[in-house]
Amino acid sequence: MTSQRRMCLMLGVGLLVPAMAVLTAREQQPPKPEQQLFKLDVVLMRYQGEKKLSSVPYTLLLGDNFTRLRVGVDVAGDSSTATSKEGVTTTRRDFRFLGTSIDGAINPREGGRHHLILSIQDSSVLPDPRFKDSGSFAFRTFSISNQLFVREGQLVPFVVGTDQITGETLRAEVTISVVK
């Protein structure tokens, strides 16, 4: 064997040993824990006095990231007209999202209490009660954001609020469970 071949073989072996040592060290590291998933159940209920008008459930899967849910429609609202310096008139129709928006995140904690970050917005359109028989309508919006510490399976009455115009009460209840 020539001295050049012997040198190349020694260099090749010298490069393999450190690479093998690195792989062995990586293999010895403990695996990262799997992402813990939570199921968030939200129920929005509307009441007129003691009479339940509606009960609408929503379910979100929460992991390491912020989760967003949007259920609704864009509704044409007012229109606005503008005239330019040149005398050109343009009309623009505004649109508004009506429906339910839920944003949530969870930070698992030791001891079974988990940090829940939750925001709920519910909007709808109804005949404007101030102008009966005029065909006018009003937009109604209910919005809440909060941070809570909750236990798995615990039913939490997240919020109760009453609409000042219609007298309807909106209630939101939440429950979390670990996905296994």
Image (cartoon, rainbow, N blue to C red):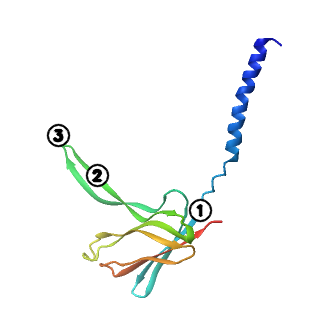
Among numbered discs 1 and 3, the one appearing first in the sequence: 1
Q: Residue at x 42, y 82 (%)?
A: 47
- The residue wearing badge 3 is 86
Among numbered discs 3 and 2, the one appearing first in the sequence: 3
Q: Which amino acid does label 3 sit on?
A: Glu
Query: For residue 11, what is the image quadrant?
Result: top right
Q: What residue type is labelled 2?
A: Arg
Image side of residue 21 versus residue 53, left or right: right
Q: Which numbered mark, 2 or 1, is in the foreground of this view? A: 1
Among numbered discs 2 and 1, the one appearing first in the sequence: 1
Q: Residue at x 29, y 73 (%)?
A: 128
Image side of residue 99 versus residue 80, left or right: right
Q: Residue at x 21, y 49 (%)?
A: 82
Image side of residue 179 versus residue 9, left or right: left
Q: Which residue is drawn at 75% across and 22% down?
A: 10
Measuring from the top left, give residue 91's x and y in whole percent.
26, 51
- How many residues crowd mark 1 within 10 Å: few (<14), some (14–19), many (20+)? some
- The residue wearing badge 2 is 92
